[in-house]
Amino acid sequence: MNSSKGQVTWKRTYYSKNIDTSLNGKEVIIVGWVSSIREHSNVKFLTLNDRFGNIQVILKKNEYPVSLDSEIPKIKEHASIAIKGKVRSEPKAPHGIEIIPSDFKILSLANKNSPIVIQSRKGVGIDTRLDLRAIDLRRPYLQSIFGIRYTVLNSCREFLRKEEFTEVNTPKIISTATEGGATLFPIFYYEREAFLTQSPQLYKEQLVMAFENVFEIGPIFRAEPSRTNRHLSEATSIDIEKAYADYNDIMETLERLIHYVWQEVKEKDKSHLEYLKIDLPELSIPFQRYRYSDLIEKLQSVGESIEWGDDISQQKLRNLDDENMKNFYFIVDWPTSIKPFYVKPKSTETECESFDLIYKNLELSSGSTRIHDKSELVERMKKQGLKIDAFDFHLKVFDYGMPPHAGFGLGLERLMMSICNVDNIRDVILFPRDIDRLSP
Ligand code: ATP
Ligand code: MG
């Protein structure tokens, strides 16, 4: 082969997306991996994928140099190859064009047959897929999902930047539980015990003192004890905190954020949505707001066994036959007793200025007005049985005029599940972590 003698430089001249019938007869070099090989009466059809798509390559005796004969059997699915060849218009080819090679170079052999079927939408069992995740991610199904994830992340940043929020990064190794729960991962920190953070809550609250409006997109760690399709041990949270605002202001920010992201995905990811067979409906804002107390009454009236003060499970929401619950909606004014200590109670004390954003029956976000008065905060912490001393680092900044503020945490993977109509959260994160899985 020319290549081994170093006479051809194997530099890509075109990506698949840039090759069309206008290049008919032109010589190109394409580089990528082989996603399928089919054979029909002595003609081999290769599909070569690059980051923008794929192109058909035809290996037909008499059309390629005899010198390639011994190399061709070495090409297996997943191999990386560079191909030099002529572009030919072919109406029957997937994109109306194909490549007739004059030479190629195998850049990396595939030594094994992959258990993952690239063309399949659902693929093989989730564990087989996750064990070889890097290969699984070559499937167009996941390429579409992660293409959308990229748009979602970008458009969240764009929206919040336009709204003049400052992007911040807060510590992920912390000394005290944010909310005192049992879902913390302890770690060794030199000679001491420390934890992975469940949420940037306390830090983003502190940062409103200096920056007013902040947001962070980062990991949160939760030692979730149960195996569900909507909980990860390491998830991505889109957190915002805003000074001089209350929960109504922040709900309005959140619904505009969701609306913006939704529109961006609709506009920028048409081909991905088409592949996933998703027709995103028009979203109208404001979203419906349901008072917690009203929902409890409604649930009781349809025979659910639920008391005021209980959490409202996914299953219970599913059982409510309400047209407005087929989309995004808020549940507001939750009982103070089931929300974290930093959530501001209403004047009634038993209810608090809080909301959950739900899509169908999936919780996407929780938010609230926060308590900014130190003594009130200490009171709430005592009621929840938290050790005040452990929060000294946090409480002491409240002595210096902490502004009133409000914020929310929005789960990126949960948002992705709602946009991509995915049931298992593991399919919208590259390398999921859960109680059973710590690798790859
Ligand atoms: P859930 O009731 O669904 O377990 P939560 O109320 O414990 O969630 P919050 O503390 O309110 O969660 O966190 C804010 C958001 O972060 C949630 O609404 C959700 O979108 C996301 N989130 C929380 N925990 C997880 C997790 N284990 N995996 C994925 N996303 C999560
Ligand atoms: Mg919540």
Image: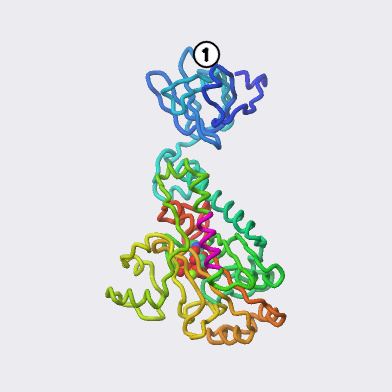
| Image quarter in which the N terminus is found | top right
At horizontal 56% and vertical 69% (from top left) the residue drawn is 249
Relative to the observer, which residue lies in front, 73 or 27? Answer: 27
Q: Is residue 298 left or right of residue 48?
A: left
Residue 36, relative to residue 378: is it above or below? above
Residue 124 in percent (x, y) is at 39, 46
Q: Which residue is nearer to you in this view: 41 or 5? A: 41
Q: Position of residue 428 (x, y in %)?
A: 48, 53
The single residue placed furthest to the top in the displayed view is 62
Tell me, yes or no, whether the highlighted magenta stretch contains residue 257.
yes
- Residue 4 visible in the displayed image: yes
**What residue lies at 65% left-to-right and 66% top-to-bottom?**
213
Question: Which amino acid lies under the numbered mark 1 shown in the image of this protein?
Answer: Val
Which residue is under mark 1? 66
- The answer to whether residue 62 is left or right of residue 324 is right
- Magenta stretch in the rendered image: 250-260
